[in-house]
Amino acid sequence: MSTTLKDILERVSIIDRDVTELNRLKSRLPADRPYSPSLQLSFDKQINNLLNERIALMDLGLISPPSWLSLKSESFEVLTGAKDEAKAPEPDSLSGEHPSEQLVLDFLRALPKTEIHLHLEACVSKKTLKFLYEKNGNPLTEEEIEEKFNFKDLMGFIQVFFFVQSSVKEPSDLAYLIESLHDYLKSNNILYSEVFFAPSKFIQNGLDFDEMVDVMVRKIRDIKSQDGTDIRILVDVSRSFGPENAMNNLNRVLKVRHPEIIGIGLGGAELMGPAKDYAEVFKVARESGLRTVAHSGEDDGPWAIWDAVTLCKAERIGHATSAIQDPELVKYMKDNHIPIEICVTSNVFTGKYVRKEQNHPVRYYYDQGLPLAINTDDPVIFNVNLTYEYFKLYRFLDFSLDEIFDLIKQGVYATFAPDKDALWKQVEARIKTVSENFGYKPKLPVLT
């Protein structure tokens, strides 16, 4: 699709005006009203959609571009007025003081990555959902599917998950979910991923756990044989169904002998089930050789994270946005090398501790030396991808490209990959190749 520079400039001006207005209105919401969380989410959803549209404008081709505007450096510096139109621009380069944001985005898209906080249901494309509903005798129009994703509050967000899960009527349907996940991984150059699979609702609907796992593992192995993409599964022992159900799910996992099923994760609504209620589940999992992670500090305070790391002994923490409130906790996680699974856009959407990207604690955590991994959490539902997540760090939180290389390395070493050194060498080699293609000399972190 192509458009004129004038049209792009006009649209970006409108987007900037609307984002400013929405942020102004959002800042005036009272914090102590029962309606505030729902309104907060509505504001954040609209702001995120506008920011994504602004980024997408960089990918548009120009009809009859001005002679002074090279195709390589089109759009964002021009769109934001960063360059004087009366002057011929300098050749665009990542090594320059102000590379075009289009060039940065292209570069980030091409870089190899890992992702380890990702929910399978939230990676299913709307095209796949439409196909599954038609296949299973309940056809929906594209408009009806879009309406499902137009949620207004946290309950609506949960309903989207139920909507996706309801598209699965038999274990074989999960192969389509894995295929959709693979498409997402490939489009973002993600070489290795660890994905949450939440079986409880499927089991309640009559599906067999072992059959579901077998379907997913076969598809995962097919994908790896095709192009080397490595996918591992963490089974969600969700708070939403209680500790007894969590132990039942763990017992199902313990009977599985597939190396692709590597452990458990504690998800679900955090305030419905404190981590301490699941300490015994985690103890059994650890003693059985499974890896353990927990969502924590996303909707509750730092005390919840303390329980997750000391009572459950979770090896990684998802979100942990409230950890910044407790310097001792930050030091404990750093000293004990407990990575945080960072999900910037997701945290802005849920809005408990983060109201906008610029205020996310990831910058503080990084500067304090905490091990981190950058993720999307729910890419289709939040209309984001891992490339955009890294771009937001660059644009809103002042991360340099070399710091992003370091974050990519930290992400590799936060995984449960069987040979992290080998995975990093593979990623490092690709970073060097991509950087050479873009004419950039990276300062890569030293392997320690």
Image (spheres, rainbow, N blue to C red):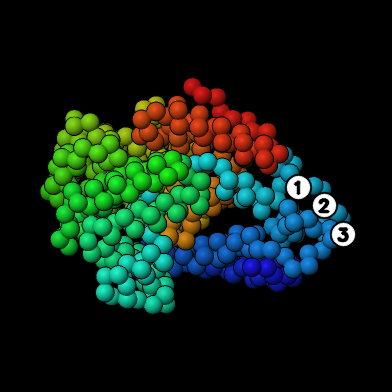
What is the three-letter code of the residue carrying label 2?
Pro
Local secondary structure at mark 2: loop
State the CA–CA distance, disc 2 to disc 3.
9 Å
Q: Is residue 85 left or right of residue 400?
A: right
* x and y, in percent, of residue 144 in the image: 38, 77
Residue 93 coordinates in the image, percent (x, y): 73, 44
Q: Which residue is mark 2?
A: 89
Q: Element under label 3?
A: loop
Is 448 placed left or right of 110 in the picture? left
Q: CA distance from mark 2 to mark 1?
A: 8 Å
Q: Residue at x 34, y 37 (%)?
A: 316
Q: Which residue is mark 3?
A: 86
Query: Pointers 1 and 3 in contact (CB under 8 A)?
Result: no
Asked if residue 39 lies left or right of residue 394, the reply is left
**Amino acid type shown at disc 3:** Ala
Query: 227 or 61, which lies in front?
Result: 227
Q: Residue at x 50, y 32 (%)?
A: 426
Total marks placed: 3
Residue 271, visible in the rendered structure: no
Q: In the rendered image, which residue does mark 1 sit on?
A: 92
Measured in 3D between alpha carbons, the distance from the residue under mark 1 to the one under mark 3, in whole angstroms, is 17 Å
The kind of residue tagged 1 is Asp
Res 212 seen here: yes
